[in-house]
Image (cartoon, grey):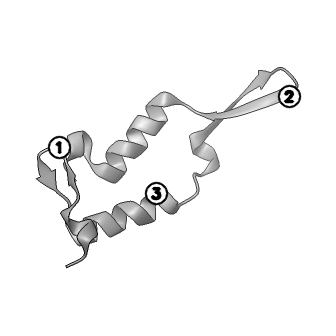
Amino acid sequence: MNSKASLEYGEGKFTGEEFEAMEQALRKRLGRNYISERPGQGGNVWYLEGWKSVDLANRIFGFNGNC
């Protein structure tokens, strides 16, 4: 079994399949709908809003570490 499968988070363990799915999701580029823009000094600033990053983390890792 892959050593990645034994990584622990919270009180549960991720299976190898879950870990691979998380790894694939984390390697994807974010769509334009996730990126926000606002004016800043010297030009516009592009950023990821906090609630969107929490939503993404919950989708990838599961709420409270429960896939």
Disc 2 versus disc 1: distance between alpha carbons? 41 Å
* Marked residue nearer the N-terminal end (2 or 3): 3
Residue 61, x across and y down, in percent: 30, 50
Residue 24, x across and y down, in percent: 43, 66
Give the secondary structure at mark 3: helix
Q: Nearer the viewer, residue 58 or 65?
A: 65
Give the secondary structure at mark 1: loop
Residue 43 tag number: 2
Looking at the rendered structure, the kind of residue marked 1 is Gly
- The outermost residue toward the bottom is 1
* Location of mark 3 (residue): 26
Looking at the rendered structure, the kind of residue marked 2 is Gly
In what quadrant of the picture does the N terminus appear? bottom left
Residue 10 tag number: 1
Mark 3 in CB contact with mark 1 (< 8 angstroms): no
Which residue: 47% across, 36% down?
A: 52
How many neighbours does mark 3 have within 10 angstroms: few (below 14), some (14-19), or many (20 or more)? few
